[in-house]
Image (cartoon, rainbow, N blue to C red):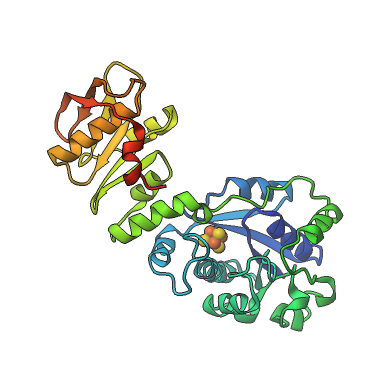
Amino acid sequence: MKAICVFSGGLDSMLSAKIIRSQGIDVLGVFFKTPFFTPEKAIRSAQLINLPLKILDITEEHLRILKNPKYGYGENMNPCIDCHALMFKCAGKIMEEEGADFVISGEVLGQRPMSQNRKALQIIAEESGLGRLLLRPLSAKKLPITIPEERDWVKRELLLDVHGRSRKPQLELAKKYGITDFPSPAGGCLLTDRIFSKRLKDLIELKKDFDIRDIELLKLGRHFRIDRTTKIIVGRNKKENQMLKDLYRKEDVLLEPKEIPGPVVLLTGDKSEKNIQLALDITATYSDTKPHQQIEIIAHFPSYTKVLKGKSHEKRIFHGILIN
Ligand code: SF4
């Protein structure tokens, strides 16, 4: 008997894998990677409990649901019901490929008001196509009986009835299973981050055909929205400056102060004279120069490089166009 565990790397998914393994069932963990949720924590958590882990990139399908989620977004830009349905659908395919018998997850009834209430859990099971082959070991006794329980592949009486937002039962279980090291519940998915979500919403509304590079750009710098197609992105430190250089494309303009320390700045979209001057002034403003000074800035255009001038201002005059 074998189960596929949809594994985020959080304590709840670690416990689910442990609970099912303690019933003599093989468990294979699967992490679904997107630009918003990367596998580092899951890899570490899987190692800690000796769980074999498969990592699958679902970016393409994920971006499709992100643009128009059937069940909407959570508090930020997190389409959790659609996202779970997609992950479990993919887990169902892996179940078949691996010759496994059912799928498990660390979901807990009532832990998240929108995506883990009774109705949402049912929708996820149905939309994924798994139906009653999806077992949530932590809350199983609070949920309708599933096929693995009905057919006695797993003993329902050994499953749990955890529900709600308290972490106490999970912490006690962690002790029982000797799990002393696990990631904190906060963080993980960028789609639950308020500022990132604001930038993403702006992108989805204004650029229908956005791609991975647009998403990667959202993760760094200060973003200034100039018009429907134009943005100015300002690096905040050495690492971000380098990343902006790496993400630069020929159709952008890349700016960097010539002689004094300052940010790397990327202008994407309309490269009109007015927009270039605005980007130059923003570059000067966020450099180490004082307000109202003019500095030289190296500007990289698609086919040539030129030294131009930008004037620094008080930062607050740009706050109206800052997406934060
Ligand atoms: S928090 Fe992120 S990864 Fe998790 S279900 Fe929601 S959208 Fe998907």
Q: Using the rendered image of the protein, determine whether residue 291 is visible from the camera's viewpoint.
A: yes
Please tell me which residue lies in front, 17 or 286. 286
- Residue 65: percent from the left, percent from the top? 42, 67
**Residue visible at 52% across and 65% down in the picture:** 74
| Residue at the image point whose x is 66% and y is 66% from the top | 107
Residue 168: % across, % down: 80, 58
Q: Quadrant of the N terminus?
A: bottom right
Question: Is residue 153 among the parts visible in the rendering?
Answer: no
- Residue 172 left/right relative to 84: right
Q: As drawn, is 247 to the left or to the right of 58?
A: left
Residue sitting nearer the eye, 77 or 141: 77
Q: Quadrant of residue 29?
A: bottom right
Determine the quadrant in which ligand 1 lies: bottom right
Image label count:
0
Left-right relation of 16 to 55: right
**Percent position of residue 26, x then y:** 72, 63
Eyeballing the image, is 296 above or below 63? above
> Considering depth in this image, is 205 or 136 the residue closer to the camera?
205
- The residue at 58%/55% (across/down) is 54
> Could you say which is closer to the camera, residue 251 or residue 298?
298
Residue appearing at x 43%, y 44% in the figure? 219
Residue 23 x %, y %: 81, 67
Residue 153 vs residue 66: left or right? right
Q: Which residue of the protein is positioned furthest toward the top in this rendering?
A: 259
